[in-house]
């Protein structure tokens, strides 16, 4: 399972994911996102700490959707290094899936422009084994180093509280 923490704070937070056995699974300083592959069963603890000052924060923890079976293929025109597709997410929590082919050693960059408002979508990039190799938002975009030659899947998902959204998703491999 992969979990993703989306912290927000006007200051620095330290976020640590800890397995029930006490070992640290991942660590990050906010504001940022933290994607962690959890390979063990059982409880996982989230520790939020501040560097000696009281801060207000919000924290969203999600288990991202797996890529859908009916992904739309993104193809680059001959000689092009990017391609764009458009789509609609009519309800909060909706997803669209895309697939493209990349070569080992390349880096995939994905951006999304949402017509209605920013900050309402998440981007996930999966390898052939359905492991998240890149994640981001429509504000930050997502980048993924491609370890193997083959298909990679991109999932765009709207926030559960979002209304209908229209977007343009651009994938580039420079």
Image (cartoon, rainbow, N blue to C red):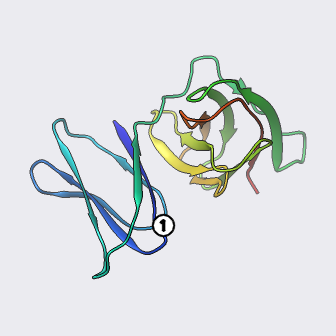
Does residue 120 lie above or below 30 as drawn? above
In this figure, which residue is indicated by the disc labeled 1? 31
| Residue 164 position by quadrant | top right
- Residue positioned 40% across, 36% down in the render: 63
Q: Nearer the viewer, residue 120 or 56?
A: 56
The percent position of residue 101, horizontal first and vertical second, equals 68, 37
Q: Nearer the viewer, residue 80 or 97?
A: 97
Residue lying furthest right: 78
- Residue positioned 63% across, 50% down in the render: 119
Report if residue 27 is visible in the image: yes
- Residue positioned 63% across, 17% down in the render: 70
Report if residue 146 is visible in the image: no
Q: Nearer the viewer, residue 41 or 116?
A: 116
Whether residue 16 sits left or right of residue 145 in the image: it is: left
Q: Secondary structure at mark 1?
A: loop
The percent position of residue 129, horizontal first and vertical second, equals 45, 33
Does residue 6 lie above or below 116 as drawn? below
Residue lying furthest left: 21
Does residue 131 lie above or below 141 as drawn? above
Q: How many badges with numbers are in the image? A: 1
The percent position of residue 41, horizontal first and vertical second, equals 18, 35
């Amino acid at each position: 399972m992969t979990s993703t923490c989306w912290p927000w704070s006007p200051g620095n937070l330290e976020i640590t994911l800890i397995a029930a056995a006490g070992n640290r699974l991942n660590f990050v300083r906010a504001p940022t996102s933290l994607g962690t592959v959890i390979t063990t069963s059982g409880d996982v603890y989230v520790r939020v700490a501040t560097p000696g000052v009281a801060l207000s924060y919000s924290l969203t923890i999600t288990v991202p959707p797996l890529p859908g079976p009916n992904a739309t293929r993104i193809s680059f025109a001959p000689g092009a290094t990017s391609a764009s597709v458009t789509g609609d997410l009519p309800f909060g929590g909706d997803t669209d899936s895309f697939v493209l082919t990349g070569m080992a050693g390349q880096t995939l960059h994905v951006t999304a422009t949402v017509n209605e408002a920013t900050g309402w979508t998440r981007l996930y990039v999966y390898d052939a084994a359905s492991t998240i190799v890149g994640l981001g938002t429509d504000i930050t975009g997502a980048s993924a180093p491609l370890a193997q030659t083959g298909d990679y899947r991109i999932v765009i998902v709207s926030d559960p509280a979002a209304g209908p959204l229209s977007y343009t998703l651009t994938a580039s491999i420079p």
